Amino acid sequence: MNRRDLLQTLACTPALTAPLFARAATSRILSAAPATLAAAGQPALPVWAYEGQVPGPVLRFKRGTVLDLTLHNQLPDPSTIHWHGIRLPNAMDGVPGLTQAAVAPGERFPYRFALPDAGTYWYHPHLGTPEQVDRGLAGALIVEDDAPPPVDLDLVWLLDDWRLDAQGRIAENFYNFHDVAHAGRLGQQLTVNGQVDLVQALQSGQRIRLRLVNAANARIFALSLEGLPAWLIARDGMPAATAVPWEGELLLGPGMRTDFIIDATRAGRYQLKDSYARGERSLATLEVQGPPSAARAAPLPAQREPLPEPDLAQALVHTLQLGGGAMSRDGWPQESTAEREARRLRLLNGAREAAPAWTINGQAHLRHDREHAGHAAEFRVPTGRSVRLTFENNTAWWHPMHLHGHHFRVLSRNGEALPERPWRDTVLLAPRDRVEVAFVADNPGHWLIHCHVLEHHAGGLGTLFEVQG
């Protein structure tokens, strides 16, 4: 992509690129390559890694700067980078066959776009995603607030799980149909930043910001931290209206993020625990040393310019019915004999892909990990019009539904209006849930909506919409 094409891409969405030349970006290359390193409790684990580390480097920028980064693909497979949660020009979204061509082994691709919103985001491939993410390709992207809540430490923890075989290597059974049709690929080894039982040393009196990113393929975490004052201040990069005390368990689905402020008020060991499945398990420990410190006032979440408010009265109304999966009421997606035979031949020739198991409005959006081209848009909307979208989960499984290129307000769940109407880019649906969201379609292009249980998406649980500009 030459400079002229980049400038045209950056100019395609004026509302998102207004601060483009206010603060220049520093160009860098991000390599993706096989590596062997200590991770997941193994002294020498073969992985795929950004810059030779798992997770990839934390990319930090000031709001309003331009991310200027070139992916150098040194993997044996094609790849891309998707910038999860960022409102960015469509050509930079990293979806092969829809927004860009796949980056072949040995090739490079430049990503360059303005960062309009502060918050906690992350990056990962959007090609061969169940395999490439599970092999280690994920990292955090932090866009710093203009006036952040004052803290002594700003910590980023990527939560993940690893499925290891009897030899302690990453299990090679990607796209296993049982995983695809059930809860997704779940691993037995839980990690924080690639480490088992991570310990973070703190001094009494310190206030920390803890940014949690669920980078697992499929695992939902039910998180708790007892013994220290803690407040939730942001979800999916969007600040809470007020700081909310962290009490009890907080569900964090795949792709979702949450930010906390935590005060280290007294010495001790305080565990971040997950209790979603198979009993309570410790993920990491905050180890506080020093004499007790006085309690501090609750923090104030960061303030920022509001996102465009959806016009509910004039909005395009659309429903997405999620179907399929094991124990389905409406059966499996229908495949023709020719489609089954074509998939069988691809697999014989070394393709790695999932069989269809899920549908949206009766259709399986099968990428075959090649292209999205050829799939018709589920709906089309003129740029600037609001969309009122309902997710109906008619399945027996949980689904974190992720919207590309936009944030949405969550309006209601199972007919009950949510008074705070929080902003999200991913919403977690329990079995049989019905959730209504709304957003302003102000970002032209073809965009994905899909389940962020990566095996579910590979098995058909996704679709496209078009913002016509």
Image (cartoon, rainbow, N blue to C red):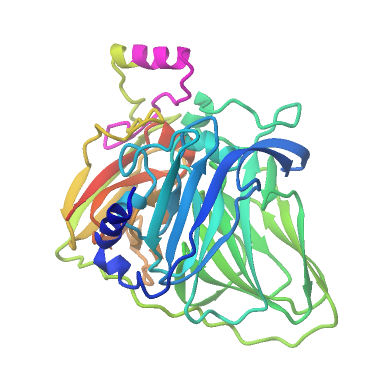
Residue 402 screen position, x and y as percent: 39, 50
Check if residue 76 falls in the magenta segment.
no
Say if residue 428 shows up in the picture. Answer: no
- Highlighted magenta segment, given as a residue range: 340-364
Residue 306 screen position, x and y as percent: 34, 75
Q: Nearer the viewer, residue 89 or 20?
A: 20
Residue 400 screen position, x and y as percent: 44, 48
Check if residue 352 falls in the magenta segment.
yes
Q: Quadrant of the C terminus?
A: bottom left
Q: Is residue 362 left or right of residue 232?
A: left
Q: Is residue 213 left or right of residue 461?
A: right
Corner quadrant of residue 431: top left
Q: At 34% across and 47% down in the image, what residue appears?
A: 1
The correct choice, above or below, for 222 with respect to 339 in the image is below
Corner quadrant of residue 41: top right
Q: At 38% across and 72% down in the image, what residue appears?
A: 420
Q: At 28% across and 55% down in the image, what residue appears?
A: 4
Residue 72 screen position, x and y as percent: 51, 43
Q: Is residue 438 left or right of residue 288?
A: left
The correct choice, above or below, for 407 with respect to 55 in the image is below
Q: Nearer the viewer, residue 45 or 2?
A: 2
Q: Is residue 226 left or right of residue 86?
A: right
